[in-house]
Amino acid sequence: QVQLKERGGGSARTGASLRLTCEASGSKFERQCLAWFRQVPGKDREGVARIEVDRLNAEYGDDVVGRFTITVGNTEIQSVAYLQMNSLKPEDSAVYYCAARPYPCTWADQSYYHWGLGTQVTVAS
């Protein structure tokens, strides 16, 4: 059973940086897409960044391109996805979720099979 666990949320000021970690365990990840989504109350979940763990090609949502970077590290038993968030803005405040699905990567959140519980990011102006 695949399990995803996010770490690293918290509070930051505008312009600061935070790094989120998603630990994906339970099986060796092959041909999987790891993605970060975020959601604020009353709004749909928004795709932030995604990466294919074997090909390492990353894509970003329009609101974060140039500020956020997704990377992944693989071991024999797990993959770890990092989301480096720089130049944070108050509108980046949300609950951030890690998600996984087999290739291909997509922004369709409903197509992801596995989800973490989320971690809150709050950016003060």
Image (spheres, rainbow, N blue to C red):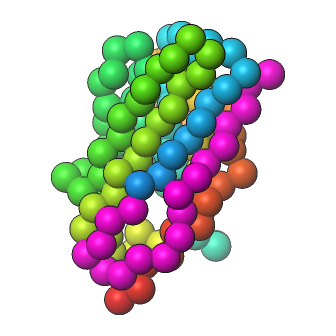
Of residues 75 and 59, the one drawn nearer to the viewer in this rendering: 75
Q: Which residues are magenta?
A: 1-18
Of residues 23 and 108, the one drawn nearer to the viewer in this rendering: 23
Vertical relation: 3 (above or below) 75: below
The answer to whether residue 116 is visible is yes
The answer to whether residue 102 is visible is no
Relative placement, left or right, of 58 versus 21 is: left
Q: Quadrant of the N terminus?
A: top right
Q: Residue at x 51, y 17 (%)?
A: 75
Relative placement, left or right, of 56 versus 33 is: left
Residue 111 position, x and y percent, is: 63, 31
Q: Residue at x 56, y 11 (%)?
A: 76
Give the quarter of the image for residue 108.
top right
- Furthest toward the bottom, the residue is 125
Relative placement, left or right, of 82 versus 67 is: right
Q: Quadrant of the C terminus?
A: bottom left
Residue 104 position, x and y percent, is: 47, 18
Residue 11 position, x and y percent, is: 49, 76
Look at the image and say whether residue 118 sits in the magenta stretch. Answer: no
Relative placement, left or right, of 120 versus 27 is: left
Of residues 113 and 121, the one drawn nearer to the viewer in this rendering: 121
Vertical relation: 102 (above or below) 64: above
Of residues 48 and 24, the one drawn nearer to the viewer in this rendering: 24
